[in-house]
Amino acid sequence: MTKNSSLLIALCAGLCGLYATAGLAQDGGLYEDVPDPSASFVRVVAAAPTNAVIDTKTFNQLDSGISGYVVVAKPGEIKLVTGVDDATVNVEAGKYYSYVVGADGTKTLVPEDITSNPAQAVISFFNLSDLAKVDLYVPAAKAVAVPGVAMNSAANVALKAPLTLDFEVRDGDKVLASLPAVDLKRRGGVAIVLRGTAGNYTVASSDSALAN
């Protein structure tokens, strides 16, 4: 059994009593009916506000540090710009990616493990703090949803939806930051980002969506 399978079983066991009252969240459409299944989908997730260019799409200012996914019609080598720095990366057809910009300036293209399921929502958890690794924890299930995410990296988990959940970011048993009432939508996605340094940490969420 895989680690992800074990996590999902634990989460489902802890959350099964909540599904009957989870009518607040609606359906999302990010991972269904995408414009071109042979395209690539690339976004920027940064520790601070930034400008960005993804392929041919320009974002003058990303106040949240997160862009929507840009549909790259011709996968292969594309250009990425954040701030005054540019890079060339290779992306594959049918894949989702986040170009992660850490507080220390580290830049990494992170492939996202995205699968489309009509009964699930995809959570993408990013550690843009100064901590070597952190966990995303679900208090209602008394279980870790995404374990051991390294600094300037990310990981994904798919959870049953619709559902509204509180989350905590933890370093071992220590709660670093809390995020209440996140709506999980079927066939949708949510990015949860931890930021901060030297014991001062914040966590925020943003719906994952295609860029306009």
Image (spheres, rainbow, N blue to C red):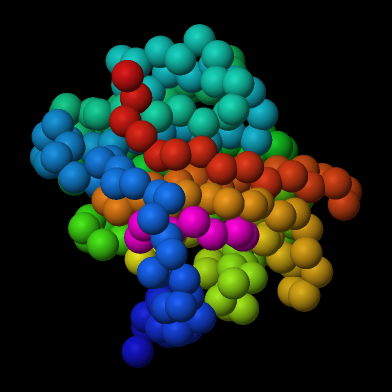
Quadrant in the picture for the N terminus: bottom left
Magenta region includes residue 173 = no
Task: Magenta stretch: give its range.
Answer: 161-167
**Image quadrant assignment for residue 63:** top right
Is 132 left or right of 123, judged from the image as shown? right
Q: Nearer the viewer, residue 67 or 99?
A: 67
When the figure is inspected, residue 200 is found, relative to residue 48, above or below; the finding is below
Residue 177 placement (x, y as % from top left):
75, 54
Q: Nearer the viewer, residue 167 or 130?
A: 167
Horizontal side, residue 156 vs residue 201: left or right: left
Is residue 61 visible to us here?
yes
Q: Main secondary structure of the magenta part?
A: strand
Q: Residue 16's spot in the image, x, y percent?
A: 42, 78
The reply to whether residue 85 is visible in this rendering is no
Residue at the (50%, 10%) spot, across then down: 60
Q: Quadrant of residue 107?
A: top right
Residue at 79% over, 47% down: 201
Determine whether, in the image, residue 176 is placed left or right of residue 199.
Answer: left
**Residue 159, horizontal then vertical, whole percent:** 39, 65
